[in-house]
Amino acid sequence: MMIDKNDLKRGLKIAIFGICFGITAQQAVFAQSKEISWGQAQQQDKEWYASGEAQRIADNVLLYQHNNGGWYKNINMADKLTSAEKDKLRAQKSEEVGTTIDNGATHTQLNYLAKIYSATSEEKYKNAFLDGVDYLLEAQYENGGWPQFYPIKEGYYEHITYNDGAMIGVMNLLRDIAKEKPGYTFVDAKRKKKAQKAINKGLEVILATQVKVDGNLTIWCAQHDKDDFSPAKARAYELPSLSGKESAGIVEYLLKLKKPSEEVKKSIRSAVQWFDEHKVMGEKVVWIKDTSYVEGHDRVVVQDSDGGPLWGRFNDIKTGKPIFVGRDGIIKSHLADIEQERRVGYNYIDNYAEELLKREYPEWEKKY
């Protein structure tokens, strides 16, 4: 029987993979061949990142990276690309307008590349990672904040952006680098020092942008003016307000600080107090089937004695009550009052700070 050389190579590769990571040949074949989504690719066991599928996706990530080190948003990095699509991406690498930290862009790609490099030691992944880190460091404002897009895109994109975890996602990555967390020890000393400086400045602007009402610290807006730090408007339905989702992420970041200053402690406790005082109880969010809509379903808030806690994605700065704003930009008091397209397309109310109040903050408070 003739033995195909490619099959022999593949079998040897699988065997080595299995020996290195202590898994069976069947598991190795699965790891080498299984196709997964971009979201799933970021949450695999450590061993998977040495697989052929993991590296195929990593090579996509390199193709999508622009020459300035950043990435566009809302791209499925796990898609299989044709030769024509790859050529098009190579031709677009010099385009920089549109590289961003919005919707998880750039910092998620970098986290992925770090895992791939740790598993493979392939220099191309390390170099791409370092280029991306340089992009993030360059994009930071002198005051410590990060804009949504870099190079700067005029409009609300210039605001210091906490929305969708943009700035906190960057700071979590840079903190892992600065603290030499496992998987990031390959980063050179110069960049580690710059990363530490960046997160120090980032902390300063986090503390400076925490909104005060009647002299008392509350939480944060989803975006703040880059010059005067005031809560700022973005899209028509994203008005200056107090943001439940984004603020929970900010507090979770602060809770991880080693040896927090008294100012940081005050910031955390003030935010937690606001969350505790403004939680909505006796209600829950449910999805219902509704064939009168194209989507076939709707998202509604119903009364439930066991429901809660809930917080608004947007909350009135003065009252702290959830507000609901559709594309007309008009504030409503109930989710049902805005258009169905926004009800199903945007999460206006959820249990954003439940884990924070129930577990994360109490554990932190025991220490301090």
Image: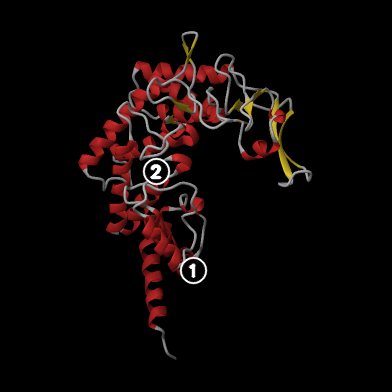
How packed is label 2: few (under 14 Cα within 10 Å), some, or many (20 or more)?
Answer: many
Label 2 SS: helix
Measured as percent of width and height from the top left, residue 363 is found at 46, 26
Sequence-wise first label, 2 or 1: 1
Q: Residue at x 35, y 56 (%)?
A: 119
Kind of residue sitting beneath label 2: His
The image quadrant of residue 333 is top right
Which residue lies most toward the top here?
214
| Residue named by callout 1 | 26
Measured as percent of width and height from the top left, residue 87 is found at 40, 64
Measured as percent of width and height from the top left, residue 261 is found at 34, 19
- Which is in the foreground here, disc 2 or disc 1? 2
When the figure is inspected, residue 349 is found, relative to residue 185, above or below; the finding is: above
The image quadrant of residue 304 is top right
Q: In screen coordinates, is 203 left or right of 273?
A: left
Which residue lies most toward the left here?
190
| Residue named by callout 2 | 107
Q: In screen coordinates, is 197 left or right of 307?
A: left
* Quarter of the C terminus within the rendering: top left
Give 219 or 19, whichever is nearer the viewer: 219
Q: How far apart are labels 2 and 1 at the CA level?
A: 33 Å
Measured as percent of width and height from the top left, residue 249 is found at 47, 31
Residue 23 visible from this viewpoint: no
Residue 49 visible from this viewpoint: yes
When the figure is inspected, residue 20 is found, relative to residue 250, above or below; the finding is: below
Q: Residue at x 51, y 26 (%)?
A: 233
- Total of numbered circles in the picture? 2
When the figure is inspected, residue 215 is found, relative to residue 312, above or below; the finding is: above
